[in-house]
Each structure stands twice: as C-alpha cells, then as structure tokens.
Amino acid sequence: MFFSVIIPLYNRPQEIDELLSTLTKQTYTAFEVLIIEDGSTLDAKEIVKSYQDDLDIHYYFKENGGQGFARNYGFERAKGDYFIIFDSDCLIPSNYLETVRNHLYEHHLDAYGGPDAAHKSFTPIQKAISYAMTSVFTTGGIRGKKRNAGGQFHPRSFNMGVSRKVWEKVGGFIITRLGEDIEYSIRIHEAGFKIGLIPTAKVYHKRRTSFKQFWKQLHFFGRARINIYQFFPNTLKAVHFFPALFTLFLIFSVLANLFCSIFAVWCNWLIAIYALLIFIDSFFENKSVKVAFLSVIASFVQLTAYGLGFMEDFWKKIILKKNNKKIA
C-alpha cells in the first residue's frame, strides 16, 4: 500500500520543518509527501528542499485559495492508493503509517480519522488546549469517537485519510473552510463508503500557542457548524447547542451576581464544581497543577468562543435569514 501524505501550508515554515522531521522517522516507508504552499508570503521552499534526500517529497506553490482547495490540488497530483491529510502543526509518531497500513489491511475502510494528543514537548498552554479539545468535560470529548453526536464518525482534517476510490467517485472538498472536513465526510458517507476511526493512529496536534489565537479558532468553529447546517440541515444536533447554552449560563451568572444574590449562589456553585472537575481530570491526565489550572481556562475559552460564534451565525443566517449564503 502506497500513501500520499498531503499537507497544505500557509506562512508556517517552522511548523512544516518539525512535521517533516517526524516523517523521516516513519517505520513504514512506502509513501510520498506533497507540500501545497497556499499563496504564502513566507514560504518554506528551502526547508522542504532540505528534506529531498530523506523523503520522496514534492513542493507546489499555488495562489491562495484556502486549505480545502489546497488539499484538492494535492489530490490531483498524488500517486498513492491512499491520501493522508495532516495539518502543518502536527507531529507524527514514528509508527503512524505502519499502524494505519496494518489497520486498513485487517479492517477495510474507505476513509478514516485518528485522534490527537499532546506531546511532552508542548508548552503548558498547548497541553491545556489539547485537553480542552479532547476532554469528556467539553464538546471536545466528541472528537476521536467512533460515533459522534450525529450518529456517524466524521474524520477531522488534521488527521484524515481517504482512498483513491473515494477521490475518484466523490471528488474532493467543495468548501475550503468553515467545516470543510465535516461536509466532505458527510458526502463520503452518503456515497456509500465506509468511514471509521483508527484509535491508535494518533497525531500530536499543536493547535494554537495562546488563548487569544485559540479563541479566534473556536469562534470560527462555531460559525462553521452553521455553515455545515446550510449544506445538511439534518446534521444539527442537540449537543451542538451545548456551548451556546453554557455561554448563556455564564452571562446569566454575571447578571445574577449583579442583581440577584439568591440565583448567584447557585450559579457560582455550579461553575465552581464544573471547573473543579476539569481541574482534577486534567491533573490526573497531565500530572501538572499548572496545566490543570490552564485547562480550566482553555475549556471555558473553548465553550464560550464556540458558543458565541454559533449563536452569531445562527441568529443571522437561520433566524433572520440574512447573509445566509453557503460559504465555500
């Protein structure tokens, strides 16, 4: 089985250097790497060139069109039986491709996704963000499960693979951002292909390096859920409203503390218990008081940023039906 590893890249030369370094250590070596530079002003051409002796690597530069269409550009040029997509801010364990190859031989999948985790080299904030995006105490707990809240597993594009047959029948991404990976997964499901999780095919996903960047990303994710709804209305489930309800509860708690002390006491206790559960769970997972404390912040940022983005576009595009154009 020959793999084509496809990585879109935009102004992140240091990240691609770290990712490519991990690919040189793969125990399974039947693969090529395609780097799609998506109109970057700070390109990684020389960095990619430095790996030519260690990897079967190909570098392409195209006009900026977004990550989804950059992946399509790679699909069109890939030689593999299977196309594997990574985000540029991932580190790949040395046995990743061997794990995927073995699983696909034993359990046929037309497309797959894998989980993410925090690497020991990550900063405390990156570990806290990773916790928030994977914890059972946040909506991140839905990610990396065999079945998500919608009843189907939807791979995420930081760690995702599709067979050449999928590409030939379904094509690639039809939107380039705002939930492009989930939209693509739904079309693969509808075409009758088998999608599954490979639990042991994890990557170390750096995500964002500050809470400000994390806020912007999760606000974008909240808006993306409404964009997906416009393509597939039946995919909007009750669990997708949880961050919005959590955000409204926080707003209510602030108002209760200002105007109604009776409600304020109950609200404060509920928030404190929830924060304590996150702190304890993160401490046992990360063995660090600092990361546990930051995990509480990261979890609240994740839920409120997603919730506000979700409510913003829900109100504009579904309730008011303004600017409700599908975003490609």
Image: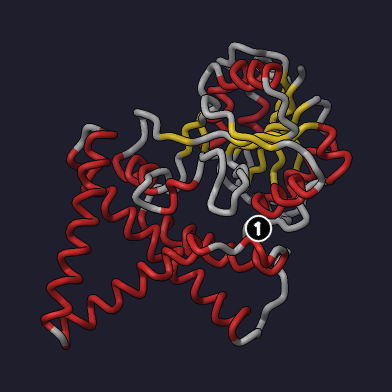
| Residue 272 in view here | yes
Percent across and percent down for residue 249 are 31, 73
Answer with left or right where residue 21 lies relative to residue 71.
left
At horizontal 60% and vertical 68% (from top left) the residue drawn is: 226
* 205 to 80, vertically: above or below: below
From the top left corner, tell me how far across and down residue 201 is, in percent: 55, 26
Identified at 42% across, 55% down, the residue is 214
In this view, which residue lies farthest toward the right? 168
What amino acid does circle 1 point to?
A: Arg
Q: Residue at x 20, y 64 (%)?
A: 270
Residue 34 falls in image quadrant = top right
Residue at the disc numbered 1: 177
- In the image, 271 versus 89, the foreground residue is 271
312 lies above or below 146:
below
Image point (59%, 18%), residue name: 99
Q: Could you tell me residue 252's position as x and y percent?
A: 28, 79
For residue 110, side relative to residue 134 (left or right)? right
Which quadrant holds the C terminus?
A: bottom right
